[in-house]
Image: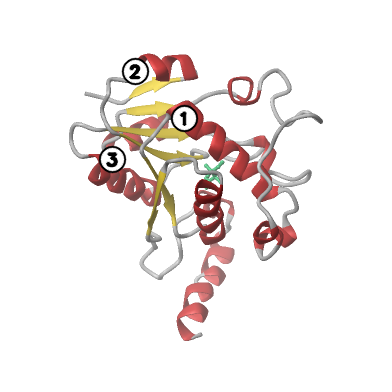
Amino acid sequence: MSAAVLHTAAELRSAEDGSRRAVVMTMGALHDGHAELVRAARREVGPDGTVIVTVFVNPTQFAAGEDFSRYPRTLDDDVRLADHAGADIVFAPDAVEVYGPAEGFRPDSVTVDPGPLGDILEGASRPGHFRGVLSVVLALMGMTRPEVAMFGEKDYQQLVLVRRMVDDLRVGVRIVGVPTVREDDGFARSSRNRYLSEEERATASAVPRALAAV
Ligand code: PAF
């Protein structure tokens, strides 16, 4: 059976059948790294469980001037990949479904403050990024209502912050970190790799070599 594509929280609610639910949250442009998250989700909830892949390019985690408008949107391919990897449901809401008519934060929105860990490393160069990430992760948890959520170790700061959030806010969702899937030369698979020219891609292979040397 192929994965069902749902767009609203109400549809997700109607699909609840009492089975164990795992969620893999993504911004789409799925690749082998995401497929590994889906397979890991299946292992968590078993053959009778429900594996949900969310596909939502979250506007609030992009700063002005970042790649929000050109971020690849490839829903048909994503559904095929998710289905092939064993997902039951692809949840692809629009911004109104997630945020209401403002399609993002309003000045009076309640959001998740990532604390000091959100201001260092990636957070230092992307102010507000982790506030957007944690707020949408919490909202997607509310909509998908999983027992367990899978996150890649590739975005390690994100994984640490999501764990902190579910612990500190007693969210009641188990977080499982999944090892990074890499190309043959050790370069991490990522949706944004498609932005790289051949030359940039060749240069980028120095990154895993340098990390291994360190
Ligand atoms: O890692 C991502 O793709 C995103 O940050 C996430 C967790 C789906 C939230 O938009």
Quick one: SS at disc 1?
A: helix
Label 3 – label 1 distance at C-alpha: 15 Å
Label 3–label 1 contact, CB within 8 A: no
Q: Position of residue 195 (x, y in %)?
A: 59, 52
Q: Which comes before the other along the chain, label 3 or label 1?
A: 1
In this rendering, does residue 74 appear at all? no
- Mark 3, residue position: 85
Label 3 – label 2 distance at C-alpha: 20 Å
- Mark 1, residue position: 75
Label 2 – label 1 distance at C-alpha: 20 Å
Decide: few, some or many residues near mark 1? Use Cα within 10 Å; few <14, some 14-19, many ≥20. Answer: some
Decide: few, some or many residues near mark 2? Use Cα within 10 Å; few <14, some 14-19, many ≥20. Answer: few
Three-letter code for the amino acid on which mark 3 is drawn = Ala
Image quarter in which the N terminus is found: top left
Q: Position of residue 167 (x, y in %)?
A: 50, 50
Q: Which mark is residue 112?
A: none
The quadrant holding residue 185 is: bottom left
- Mark 2, residue position: 15
Disc 2, ligand 1: is the CB inside 8 Å? no
The quadrant holding residue 106 is: top right
Q: Which comes before the other along the chain, label 3 or label 2?
A: 2
Q: Nearer the viewer, mark 2 or mark 1?
A: 2
Q: Nearer the viewer, mark 3 or mark 2?
A: 2
Quadrant of the picture in which ligand 1 is shown = top right
Three-letter code for the amino acid on which mark 1 is drawn = Leu
Quick one: SS at disc 3?
A: helix
Three-letter code for the amino acid on which mark 2 is drawn = Ala
Q: Position of residue 43 (x, y in %)?
A: 23, 46
Looking at the image, which is closer to me, 201 or 29? 29
